[in-house]
Amino acid sequence: MHRPGIVLLLCLSLAGCAGQFFHPMSRHVSLPSDRGLAYEDVRLTAADGTRLHGWFLPARVPARGTVLFLHGNAENISTHIASVAWLPARGYHVLLIDYRGFGASEGAPSVEGALQDIDAAMRWLLARRGIDRRRIVVFGQSLGAALAIHYVARGEHRPHIRALIADSAFASYRGIVREKLSEFWLTWPLQVPLSWTVSDRHSPIHSAPRLAPIPVLFIHGERDQIIPPGHSRLLYREASKPKQLWLVPGGRHIDAMQRPEIREKLLEYLDARLIGNL
């Protein structure tokens, strides 16, 4: 098939199936131990019986809190671990999970399924000995940030969540599909009708106003060409206080945690919410 036809079919597939937001990889390219990190293999079971896998990284100094990390739409936890691998040395436990269909987790990915997977991770943290149930933070990146916003706003365990970090989130599933379709001349005329085939029921824009009183921090690179920073600006505008928006000068997609100055600023933010108000 000629190239325009292939592109059109791909865009139709994207617009017609929310599952196309997910691009999983089964093989782990590395282990936490390759980075000198102690870790525990975690086995979870979602509410529908799907068996899931994750890694628990214990804090290397007295724990200040626990971070539940939700990665983006591609690959698996082994390729996203760099975003949180620095936290155990700074006093934070970290639980990374792979959504169903990713890494060693069973099943096929979907938005509804991923929300169940996040809930299974929260239940695991709340049941684990040594976890302070008053000091849990949810940290999502890209698609993981979109999922996190919906889950934190509406999940039954929200009383245990002390803060939400949404890094490079998009505001709407339908909206991001429309943007991507508009980038290619062949699909530009179809951006509106095709985007309407995507459900917007779980979109962050609908949940952002319901996050309060949980503090939310939006982070976005000003030069993000995958998800433009306007998405976080919109989410910030719709969210109620307490809220903050950090726009990273020159930042690209989910690269903020590669910057030492952002890491230090984030630690100050976390300490203020997990330590200062107890």
Image (spheres, helix red, strand yellow):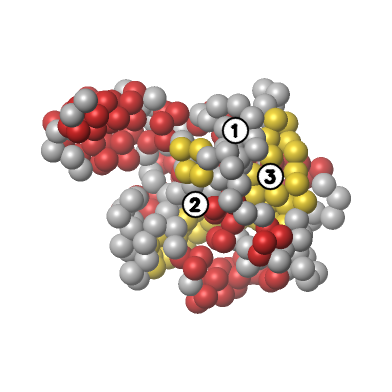
Extreme residue toward the right, this view: 129
Amino acid type at mark 1? Arg
Name above or below for residue 53 compared with residue 136. above
Q: Earlier in the sequence, mark 2 or mark 3?
A: 3
Please name whichever residue, 181 or 222, is drawn nearer the observer in this view of the structure: 181
Q: Residue at x 35, y 70 (%)?
A: 249
Could you say which is closer to the camera, residue 2 or residue 148? 2
Q: How far apart are the alpha carbons under marks 1 and 2?
A: 17 Å
Instruction: Evaluate whether residue 229 shows in this view.
Output: yes
Residue 21 picture location, percent across and down: 42, 35
Secondary structure of the residue carrying numbered label 3: strand
Crowd tier of the residue under label 3, counting other residues whose Cα lies within 10 Å: few below 14, some 14–19, many 20 or above: many
Foreground tag (1 vs 2): 1
Please give the residue where the numbered disc 1 appears in the rendered image: 100
* Residue of label 3: 54
The x, y position of residue 229, in whole percent, is 33, 56
Residue at which label 2 appears: 141
- Labels 2, 3: front one: 3
